[in-house]
Image: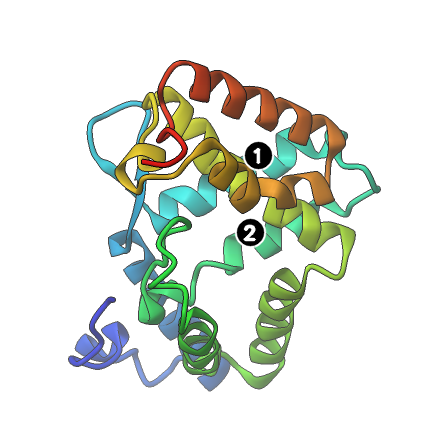
Amino acid sequence: MTSNEDGLLAERNPWPEKLESRLKDQFTFLIEVDRLKTVLRQSPLAAVDRRENDAEHSWHLALMVTMLAEYADEPIDVGRTVELVVLHDLVEIYAGDTPLYDTAAAVDQQEREEAAADRLFGLLPPDQATLFRARWDEFEARGTPEARFAKAMDRLQPMLLNWIAEGGTWLSHGATADTVRARTSSIGDASAVLWDAGQALIAEADRRGWTTPTGK
């Protein structure tokens, strides 16, 4: 979890008095979310031997939405879907990352993330605080085509990284092929084409020994 004991990052250098209040709040939020670059995920990067951070993950999802929207089962608003994937992990600044295959860490995930959402989005001007929180809630609820596709990207992206890493977190967390299928099945809620591709990757990864054998 990212510590915030030293207060908001923007408090280190107060804004000039001449800035109007709304802009100060927006700047304060933008500086605070710089913390996202320090939140490490479990997924390995493809290009270098280190783990990705949340900001890199969010950028990758935004690009995936733009590129893969053609495979959505339902028409989606690409701009709105990009908003969802850019916003959804911001709460991990305060709540920390919860690895997909760590069942113990997931027990209080919802409680931690909702408290973090209240705290973080509350830094914004009221209208934007309401809008951003609504977008975050939309992603979590998956009640719209955009939210379902955003969630699908959130599951597909680490799958691609684990494939390149020859198992990655699938092996480090002891995930079987069936476990991987269960944890990534939400891809199928948004795109039959991408879920077929995902299942092909999982099956081949299992054949190559990149997932944990059942019973181990």
Is 58 on the left or on the right of 128, as rendered?
A: left
Q: Position of residue 149 (x, y in %)?
A: 68, 45
The quarter of the picture where the C terminus appears is top left
Height in image: 117 above or below 62?
below
Front-most of residues 106 and 215: 215
Front-most of residues 152 and 100: 100
Kindly report the distance in space between the C-alpha atoms of the residues bearing marks 1 and 2: 10 Å
- Which of the 4 image quarters holds residue 205? top left
Is 198 on the left or on the right of 189, as rendered?
A: left
Residue at the image position 60 percent from the left and 56 percent from the top: 84
Q: How crowded is mark 1: few (under 14 residues within 10 Å), some or many (20 or more)?
A: some
Please tell me the numbered disc located at residue 85.
Answer: 2
Please tell me how many numbered marks the rendered image carries: 2
Residue at the image position 58 percent from the left and 74 percent from the top: 133
Q: Is mark 2 on a helix, strand or loop?
A: helix
Residue at the image position 39 percent from the left and 14 percent from the top: 208
Which residue is at the far right? 75
Height in image: 198 above or below 91?
above
Q: Name the residue under label 1.
A: 64
The quarter of the picture where the N terminus appears is bottom left
Residue at the image position 24 percent from the left and 72 percent from the top: 9
Q: Position of residue 19 (x, y in %)?
A: 40, 79
Is 145 on the left or on the right of 139, as rendered?
A: right
Front-most of residues 179 and 69: 179
Q: Which amino acid does label 2 sit on?
A: Val
Q: What residue type is labelled 1?
A: Met
Can I make out residue 80 in this image? no
Do tag 1 and tag 2 residues touch (Cβ < 8 Å)?
yes
Q: Position of residue 47 (x, y in %)?
A: 29, 23
